[in-house]
Image (spheres, rainbow, N blue to C red):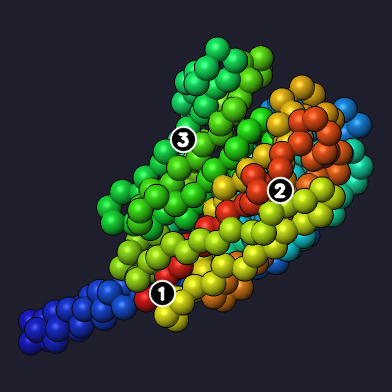
Amino acid sequence: MRAHRPLLVLLAFAAAWSGLTAAAHAKLKLRLAASSASVQLPASDSLGNVFDDAQRFSTACRANERAISPGIVDASRHIVGQSFGPSAVGGFAVGAPGQVRLRLQVLCASGANVTHTRVPSTTVPTSATTLRTTAKARCSGGRVSLGAPLSQEFSPGLGRFTSRPVGTGGWEVRIEGIPTTFPLDRAEPAYADIACVPTRVLKSVTTEQASTEDLHAATSASVTVKCGGGRRAVGWGVDLQPFTRSRWSSATAGWVLPLVRRATLSASAVAFTFEIPPGGSPGGANGLSPAEVAQTAYVRCGKPA
C-alpha cells in the first residue's frame, strides 16, 4: 500500500483543488418567478398595523434559492409589510374591502451566499403634532443591499414614504408626517428588510432613478427605469409623495399615498405605475396641486458574475 500512497495523496489534492476552483468560479444565477395570490380585505380595514391573516400573501423561490427582490405585476390595493423569507418574500394587502387577486414576482438567486438583515425604525418628533420614523440597514463584508421596499407596517395613510438604496450596501426607509395620535404602541411603523449579495458575484452596481409625471385626480402615472451598460435590474425602491393633505384619521378616510400598482421586473428595467387608491380623494380643500405629487422610482442595477 505504501507504493500507492503518493498517488492517493495526488488524487485527494486534485479533488480538493477541483472543489476550490469550482467554488471560486461559482456564478450568480438569477431566476424571475411569477405567482398570483388571492387575498380577502375585511369590511373594516386595519386601523394602523394589525392585519388579518386573509390579507397575507407570499411568493416563493425554490428551496436552493434565496429571494433578493419582489416584483408587482398588478396590485389594485396597497401592499405593505414586505419582508424576506429567506427563500420567499411576503406582505399584506390593505385598503378597500373585498377579494383581490394580486399578480406578483420574486427575483431568486443561487450560486452565492445571500444573507438577509432586518432593522426596525426609530421614531422622533418633528413638531408638536407630527413624528418621523427612520430605519437604516447596511450589508456587511462588501455586499450589495437589495430591499423589500414596501416595508411600512401600517395602512399607508400618514405622509411621505421613502424606501431607497444608500450607497452600495445601505438601505433607508423613512416616513414623515406621522400624527402623534397614531397608535405606535401596536408595532414599529416601519423597518428596513434587505437582502445582501456579495459584490464578487454582482459587479458594476449602480442605482438609477426617474420620476413620474404629476399624479392627477383619479388617474395613474407610469415610468420605466432602465439599467444601462449591460446591467441587470436586481431591485427597486420608491419615494411616494402624498396626493392629499388630509391627515390620517381612519382606514377608510385616511389614504394619502398612491398605491404601487405595478413594479414589474424585466431583465434590464423595472416598469412602475402609481395610482390613487380606491377610496382615496385628491380633491377638496385638502388637495395638493399636481406639481406636488410626482412619484420617484429607484432601480438597483448590476452585472451578475
Determine the residue positioned at 88% across, 34% down: 42
Numbered tag placed on residue 303 in the rendering? 1
Pointer 2 residue? 290
Tell me the kind of residue under disc 3: Ala
- Relative to 172, residue 197 above or below: below
Q: Nearer the viewer, mark 3 or mark 2?
A: 2
The x, y position of residue 113, in whole percent, is: 39, 60
Q: Earlier in the sequence, mark 1 or mark 2?
A: 2
- The answer to which quarter of the image holds residue 297 is bottom right
Report the side of 22 relative to 130 (left or right): left
Q: State which tag comes first along the sequence, 3 or 2.
A: 3
| Residue found at x 77% / y 56% | 220
Residue holding disc 3 = 135
Q: Nearer the viewer, residue 95 or 243?
A: 243
Q: What is the distance, in whole Å, between disc 1 and disc 2 at their CAs?
A: 37 Å
| Residue 109 in sight | no
Q: CA distance from mark 3 to mark 1?
A: 28 Å
Instruction: Give yes or no for contact between labels 1 and 2 (Cβ–Cβ under 8 Å).
Output: no
Mark 2, secondary structure of its residue = helix
Q: Is residue 231 visible from the viewing direction of this image?
A: yes
